[in-house]
Each structure stands twice: as C-alpha cells, then as structure tokens.
Amino acid sequence: MRIGFIGTGTMGLPMLNNLLKKGYQVCAYDLASAALEAAQKAGAERAGSAAEAASAGDLVITMLPSSGNVEKAYLGPGGIIERAKEGTLLIDMSTIDPGTSQRLAARLKERRLRFLDAPVSGAVGRAIEGTLTIMVGGEAADFREAREVLSAMGRNIIHVGPVGSGEVAKLCNNLVAGAAMIAVCEAFRLGEGFGVDAKILTEVIAHSSGATWVMEHGHPVPGINPNAASSRAYAAGFMTDLMAKDVGLAVAAAREKRIPVFLAPTAAQLYRLASAYGFGRKDFSSLYEFLKPAAPDAPV
Amino acid sequence: MRIGFIGTGTMGLPMLNNLLKKGYQVCAYDLASAALEAAQKAGAERAGSAAEAASAGDLVITMLPSSGNVEKAYLGPGGIIERAKEGTLLIDMSTIDPGTSQRLAARLKERRLRFLDAPVSGAVGRAIEGTLTIMVGGEAADFREAREVLSAMGRNIIHVGPVGSGEVAKLCNNLVAGAAMIAVCEAFRLGEGFGVDAKILTEVIAHSSGATWVMEHGHPVPGINPNAASSRAYAAGFMTDLMAKDVGLAVAAAREKRIPVFLAPTAAQLYRLASAYGFGRKDFSSLYEFLKPAAPDAPV
Amino acid sequence: MRIGFIGTGTMGLPMLNNLLKKGYQVCAYDLASAALEAAQKAGAERAGSAAEAASAGDLVITMLPSSGNVEKAYLGPGGIIERAKEGTLLIDMSTIDPGTSQRLAARLKERRLRFLDAPVSGAVGRAIEGTLTIMVGGEAADFREAREVLSAMGRNIIHVGPVGSGEVAKLCNNLVAGAAMIAVCEAFRLGEGFGVDAKILTEVIAHSSGATWVMEHGHPVPGINPNAASSRAYAAGFMTDLMAKDVGLAVAAAREKRIPVFLAPTAAQLYRLASAYGFGRKDFSSLYEFLKPAAPDAPV
Amino acid sequence: MRIGFIGTGTMGLPMLNNLLKKGYQVCAYDLASAALEAAQKAGAERAGSAAEAASAGDLVITMLPSSGNVEKAYLGPGGIIERAKEGTLLIDMSTIDPGTSQRLAARLKERRLRFLDAPVSGAVGRAIEGTLTIMVGGEAADFREAREVLSAMGRNIIHVGPVGSGEVAKLCNNLVAGAAMIAVCEAFRLGEGFGVDAKILTEVIAHSSGATWVMEHGHPVPGINPNAASSRAYAAGFMTDLMAKDVGLAVAAAREKRIPVFLAPTAAQLYRLASAYGFGRKDFSSLYEFLKPAAPDAPV
C-alpha cells in the first residue's frame, strides 16, 4: 500500500519512519524543505505539494501543527482536495479543534472523500518507538480500514466515536491533566509556604481524594519522583507550550458549543504566560517553578 | 481518662459516641442546646461552658464549624484558655485555616497548654464507623500521646509535621480534589457537546494522564459509576458547601503566605456560586449539573 | 448607487432601511426567508443567493451573526466570491474575530476584491435611528469611499487601522466594559453583604479610581440610576448573550496571537453561564442578580 | 487635644506631621524604633507601647500595615485595650478587612471604647500634602467628633455607614480599579498583537462603554498619557503590591459573607504573581508589561 504523508516535522518524521519500517511506500510533503529532505533521506518519495502527495496515496496521513495548517493542506491552493482520488481515506493525526475536523469532513464528503481524525498522545519518544496512543473519530468501517496502518505508529488505538471525537477525547484528557497539574503545583507551593514536608504531603494526597496521575507520574516538586521531569530540571516530557495549545483548543471547542468552562481557560492562560517567562519548552510540571511566591516583604 | 469535648454537632456527636464506646468518660459542651442534649443522651456529662468542659478533661477535643468558632471557644469569654489545667493537651479537629491554628498554638503555649491540629477527612458515615482519616500537626511527643484517643475515632492517623500541618494537608488534598472534579466536569460537558459517549471518554482518560481519583470514585456523570453520588441524584458524599469552604480556606492560607494560586480561587467561587443555585447540600460532583451549556440559540 | 446587502436580521433590517431612506437601491439576501421577505417589504430587491446579491451591487454589505456565517457567505457555495465584480468593495459589518477578517481579506484580494471590516456598536435602537458607532479596518482609500454609505447607518465612523482593526477595537472595548461590569457587580454585592448603602458606595467610587462608564450609565443595582437597564428589570440594553459572544471572541483573538488574558475568559464564561440560568436576553448588568450569595447557612 | 498615634511608618509619619502642624500634641508609638525616632524628631512624644500611647491620648489613631498588626496593637499584650481611657474614640486608618474592624469594634465596645474605621486613599504624596481621601465607618456622632482631626490629614472625608463600611468602600473601589486596569492591559495587548495603534484604540474606548478612570488617568501603555506612571517607567503611583493586598482583602471579605467573586481573586493573584516577577514596587499599571505574549514560535 502506498501512503501520502503530509507534515514530516518533529513528530511526523518518526511516524513516517515506522510506516517505512513496516514496508509501506510513502510519498511525503512538507512546506519546510529541510523537513521534506529528512523524509526523503529516510526513504520516502518527495512530492511537490500536498495535492501531489495525496494523489499518490491509497491512504493519506496528515500531521500538522495547527488548525490553520490543516485547513490549508486540505482546502488551500495545492491542497489535498484538489487531487485526492475519489473514495480515498484521509487521516488527520494533528491536534486541532474538533469543530474544524467536523467542518473539514463535511467538505471532503461532498467530494466523496473519507476522513478520520486521529490525534496521538505520547511525545517524540513514543513516536520513535511506535507506541503512541491514537484516538480516532469517524465511521466504524473507516476505522477498521485504518487500523493496520495506524498500528505501525501506535500501540493503543481507540475508536472514540463520530468525526471529531478523537480530538475531543485528546483535548478532554489534556484539559484534566493540565488543570490537575496546576492544582498540584498550587497545593505543594502552599505546603511549602507552611513548612510541610513535600514527601509526607505526597503520601497523604496519594492515598486520598486528591490522587492524580500527574502527581504520581509527573510530580512537579524536584526530588520526590526521580523519574519525573522535575527531577531532571523539567526537561520535557510534555512541553508547557503544547499544554497551552491543547487546553487552549479545549476552550475554543467549548466556546463553539456554548459550554461554560472556568478552570480550562485559566489553566491555558497560565501555561501561556509561563511560556512568556521562559518555561515554554520545559515540561508542563515546571508551572511549579513559575508559580513562585510574591516578595516576602509584600504587604498582605 | 476523661475527655473534654466541645462541639457536638453533626460530625462531633458520632465522634464523641465512639469515645464513649471505647470507655472514655466525656464532658461535653456545645453552644446549641439541642446538640448538647444529644451528647448528654449519648452518655456524656454536660458542661455549662467550653471552659468548664476543658477544666474537666485530662485531654480536650474541639470539633467546630469555622475559624471564628474555634477562636471563640479557645480564647473568648468562657473559653478553654480560662480554665484548662496547665499542661493539658488540646486537640482541635475542626477544619480551619492553618494560620489560625498556629496563632492559637502560640497563645496557648504562653499559658503552658499544648495544642495539636487534627482535622479529619471522611464524612458522617465514616465518623459513625470510626474510620476517619486524621491528619495531625504538632509536636511528635504530643502526637504519640494523642494517638490512642484519636484511634477511637479514626483509622488512618498521620503525623504530618509541626502545628498547622494537619490543616495544610487536608486543605491541599481538597484543593486538588476540588479543582480536579471541576476539570472533569468541564471535560465531560465538552464531550457531551460533541456527542462523545461518556463511557468511552471515561475509558480513554482513565488510562491516560488525566486519570484522577475523583473521576474513578466520584464520576460526575450519572450512570457511569453506579457507586458514585451522581448515580443517586448527587446525594452527598462530600457536600458542595464543604468543598467551597475547604478550597476557600486554602485560598485564604495562600494569601497569608503570598503564594499565587489561580485554580483554587476559581474553583472555590464556582462551588460557592453553585451553592447559591441550590447545589450546596448535594455532592460536589453536582458541579457537572451546575455547569450546563448556555441557551442553544445564544450567538457564538 | 446599488448596494448588495446580505444578512437582513434584527440588526441588518433597520440598517438596510436607512440605506433605502437615503435613496440607495438595495438588493438583499438572507438564508432565512422570513428575514428576506421583510427586506423586500421594506423596498429592497430580493436575490436568490449571496452571490446574486453581491453581483448586483456596486458595493456589498454583510451583517451576519457569526464568523462561520461570514465565511460561508463569502467563500461557500453560492457565496459572494463567486460572482462579485472585480474591484468591488465588500464591507463586513458583523462582529467576528479579527483573524477571520484578515484571512478573508487575503483570499478576496487574490480575486481583486476589496474588503473592510466595519462592526458596529449600539443596539437595535441606534440601528433604527441611524446613529450607530462604526469601527472600520482596511485601506484608507477604501474607508474614504465607504464613508458616505456608512453615514447612512451610523453617526460616529472611525478608521481604526488595517483590516481587522475595526473588529479589534470593538472587541477590546467590550472586553473592558464586560470585565468592568462584573467587577462593579462584585463590588456592590460585597457592599451589600456588609450592609453598605449602594448610593453612598456609588458616590465614593464615582469620585475615585474605580470610576467607569458602566457604573455611571449602566449601574447594575436597581434604583440607583433610573435610566439604567437594572431599573427596568434588566430589559436590554446590551444582552448578556452578546457580551458573552464578544468577550469570547476577544479571548479567541488573543489565543491566535499568543497573548495571555485572564479576566477576559473568566468574564466570558460568567456571561455564558448566566445565559444558561436565564439571563441571556437580559441586559449584561443582570450579572449582579446572577452573582447572588451562597446559602446563609453555608459553612465558611 | 492630645492624640495617641500608633504606626509611624511610610504613610503614618506624614499624617502625624500634619497633625503636629495643626497644633495637636501627639504621643507616638511604633514597633520599629527607627520609625518611632522619626516621629520623635518630627515633634511627637515617644511612648513605650501602644497601650501607653493610647492612654496618653484623648483620641487615638492607628495606621498599621495589616489586620494582624491591628489586632495585636489593640488586643495583644501591651495593646490599646489595656490602658485606653473609658469612652476614648479610637480611629483605625489602616487598610484591613472589614470583618476584623467589626469584630474589633465589638470587643472594644465591651470595654466602653468607641471605634471608627477610616482607611485612606491617595499615596504618600497626598499624605504629605494632607489631601487624602478618608472613608469612615462607625457611629454618626463619632464621625462628627473625628471630623476635625481627620481634616488635618485629608481633604475629602466621607461617612460611609456603620463600622466596617469605610474599609468596604475602599476595598470595593480598589477591586473595580484593580480589575479594570487588568482588563485595559489585556485589551491593549490584544490591540498590539493585531497591530492596532494604541492612541486610536484609546480614543475609541474613551468614547465608548469601556471608558474607565484607570485608562484615562493611569494608561498602562507608555507614551499615551505623559502624566501616567507608565510614562515614567511605571514609578508608583499605586504599587502593584498594595493592589494585590487590597484586592486580596476584598476576596477575603467576600468569603466571609459567602459572596461569589470571580474577577477579584483572579486579579489579586495576577498582581501577586507580578510581584514575584519584580513588579511589586512598580505602579500597578505595570501589569501591562507583566502580561507579555508567549514565545512567537509557541504552537497555537
């Protein structure tokens, strides 16, 4: 089978590599020539546009940084819609807002093109290993058809529901993880302010209603969990900038459906502000460092 | 041993009962005569003031609703400080802000009185069973001395650190639980808005970075976890009003130490506003109901 | 001069009427046939699509409820771009996010079509009077050309800057007004809680650093300003739903430019939640009613 | 008349000076010996404790940095309550939470001592000039009695209502001013992100519903208002740290009355976090600088 692959950046390249390893032929395209050359070196054919890559594929994968990029790659000049063969299955593995996925799917359907949204979780390390989690939205038949190809890139492949559901599931998870991490940071700053030992506080919370995956696996206080990013100077892990993006997308998606969300936007803005203060490429648990107390002589 | 027990309300009464069951003599006081009568019926002696109850005890326990009540019971007219015997160990099991605990301990120390803060977690059900979790702040020697008496009321008894640490641990845990619950509610409202099945979404999050105790044990969407409060019309469980109180105390404590906290105050205010709309005595997972979408014809 | 007018709803219809009064010929289109009939009755020609209305005009005006509607009317099937004459000046008077305005302008420019964004402030009353404020973004020459036509609908017509600037100015103003109103509501709820007379509090703030247009002209406490919406049971005025939309658009615009905003999203979400509780079509000062205190017996 | 004056710090000293200038005798006390010496040099008698200063006065003024300091000065060992003559009028000009003022007044009343809360607005400059605004809470008769003395220190002296009302009025005003300033900062950051000229944006908002005192007199963008703190590198003016304190007090006061406030706590926390990043002693309009955009390569 031949796969058109558009978006061969930091995440896309190792995913493409895993497709090649499994014996798929890949025709690649990326706006950035350096990224495209890397794909070529890895063994992919080189296309001159998204449209060309798409027309070469029996199945097309896109892995792009933003909703705007996805819209352009599918609908813009030289875009997938121009030359993809009727009936082709198009799989967008980018993390974007689910409304865009749904609108895109509707436009593509008019041209008899099939669409799945299939965002991934797991950072570059798991993209290299081929052990990503992949959350898929779309028709059950299309999901079954895509499964084998997706299995070349990920281990845990879940059909969540109709188009857009893959994105929704990813954003919902990251909303909770992102908010819970900040809550944990606030709690441990408070403990520190009152001189409470962070290890004992961790024990108490771990066995109570405040237990969370993020505290267990990504404890923000350095030295508590030696495997956590905090214990290696917050080397990501999952970058603050990506958490700002994902929680921001969740807020945008909520707006579209008129759903009031309060913690999500506050969390998104904090990650964004932390990025402005140099924490963008550190692990998102570095919010702990960012949320430092006011000057000790500040009036209360 | 004889125990002075002040505060025989909803939580205090079953705790006092467990002390009586273990053979302790108890001399009780409460401002509300109905509460005091209940204690008397249960087998306690009846004191005419906090001071009298305290003077009758070899050890004194207080279980009161707010920082203001605690201050009055210890320092006000007819208060514990007036008549407690030198060296008496005073244990405050109320949930109040740790700064008040610390200031109180300092005042009591001047009169050679010893103090532990020992707030509990677990609602009335566990108070009746005697299986509360008790988080204790104060001197190690005082903690050892108190342990047996506390064991009559709770199962998991933890020495967290110096005075105030018990309160800090409780507030930190509830800050995380309270914020995580709202994040979970926002995520599932978002999922619902996009038509994603709540069970599948639960599965995805439960196996990913968004996993939290509150979703596992207190899932806010009715019907997902049959044991959760949401599946019995949000009958508490842990009341919204109490979560508003505890997260509010965490915010007050953070202010005292100049620690910036963002999710905590937003969470506290949401629980408080939910109380204004009739959710105060429901389980705190009822925030899911409170956070309903805007009118479907509202412009976006 | 002949004008193509797309979007003849609640705001569009009185604006169209004022164009007719000034002697302009108008060719109208609206997706809703009732709205289109009303325009016809008023004296406009009736077009069968946005494209047809646009092709009939020397200048085209759009007045639509959301970014999605605007994108469809310009770029969708049967859209303006299909048949507008080369060089036509297209004026979008909808309130949408400035990023969409800018992307739209770029697409239209490829087809040699000129574009201004020109959102209005002032509700239906001022649309009827022809006294709207109109904030315009785009080329200075296009602004000069549009001025006379815009003057038929508004009184205060401002060239803010390049394309998108009109939207930015409107959203920025409403961000401040919307946030300031909530701050005023919180302040007066606090005053009320402590038994402070609202009139005296108003006097103090009006002569101090907290003075704001919204308190002076739209005081949220009934009875202070007899001309304010609060004194007529919060009959709008400017609806809560519209404020939720505009502040929400400001948040979306900030996300696009990576600008951290904290009060804006909290304000937007409060207006949205208030809409869910029946305040959507009331004046936005009704947030005062929405933000009522928790139950008096709630623990603190 | 002889005045006991407790708290001769940065604000207290110039206020005391103005009393001396008007011919009042002053007996001063401050915990910090340097501050007390300065008062002595200015011409005040020196007392050895708050109690001594109070006993020397026909009227007593306190001007202290926090609720904790006020409680100690009145009720602690060596405090005012110990030696103030029956019937003495005690005026607390500190900015503290109104609940503390009310509880204090009740305690003092038991000892037949009269109490006014009378916080000031206006920074050191106006304290030196004697042109402070003074907001007073308490009995009308006590207010009338205090008026002449207060007039030595301030120009605009307002009786707001019962005890605590002075504090409430001050906090309410600063809540609105503090929140409005952040909203203005967010709006102008957004304008900047879209390339809109800050002067034109100022013009638009100044003539619309977003008009506020803080934008007119304290515009946060440097160069728009040459008299604003922003145009002198944010030299205060009104310090970020003081705004964090005052809005934080408003939040604490709201908690006591179960009033849900959302913008106030978010604003308070932002000012506090800005303090941690070096903006504490700058003018509070420096939030504009603090709220800088995320890195330009951050994904959106």
Image (cartoon, coloured by chain):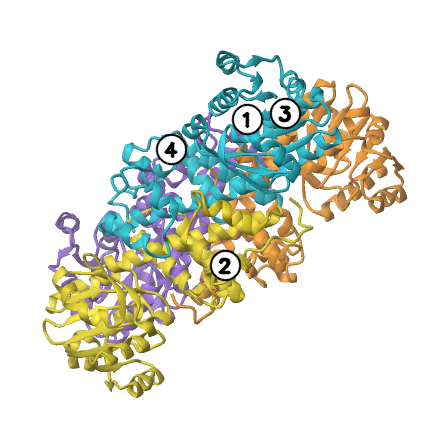
Chain colours: A orange, B purple, C cyan, D yellow
Q: Chain of mark 1?
A: C
- Along the line of sight, the residue nearer the viewer: D256 or C224: C224
Tell me the kind of residue under disc 3.
Answer: Leu
Query: Disc 4, disc 3: CB below 8 Å?
Result: no
Mark 1 closeness class: few <14, some 14–19, many ≥20 residues within 10 Å: many
Mark 1 vs mark 2, CA separation in Å: 36 Å
Q: Which mark is nearer the camera, 4 or 3?
A: 3
Q: In percent of the image, x 38 and y 49: which residue is there?
A: C212
- Say if labels 4 and 1 share a chain: yes
Mark 4 vs mark 1, CA separation in Å: 20 Å
Tell me the kind of residue under disc 2.
Answer: Asn
Quadrant containing the N terminus of chain C in the rendered view: top right
Tell me the kind of residue under disc 4.
Answer: Gly
Q: Which mark is residue D261?
A: none
- Say if labels 4 and 3 share a chain: yes
Residue D109 horizontal side relative to residue A250, left or right: left
Q: Which mark is residue C59?
A: 3
Mark 3 closeness class: few <14, some 14–19, many ≥20 residues within 10 Å: many
Tell me the kind of residue under disc 1.
Answer: Met
Residue C159 horizontal/vertical position (percent):
58, 41
Q: Which mark is nearer the camera, 1 or 3?
A: 3
Quadrant for residue A14, please give it. top right
Residue A106 appears in the picture as rendered: yes
Mark 2 vs mark 3, CA separation in Å: 39 Å
Mark 1 vs mark 3, CA separation in Å: 14 Å
Q: Which mark is nearer the camera, 2 or 4?
A: 2
Circle 2 is placed at which residue position? Answer: D225
Residue B223 horizontal/vertical position (percent):
45, 29
Circle 1 is placed at which residue position? Answer: C63
Quadrant for residue A280, please give it. bottom right
Q: Chain of mark 2?
A: D
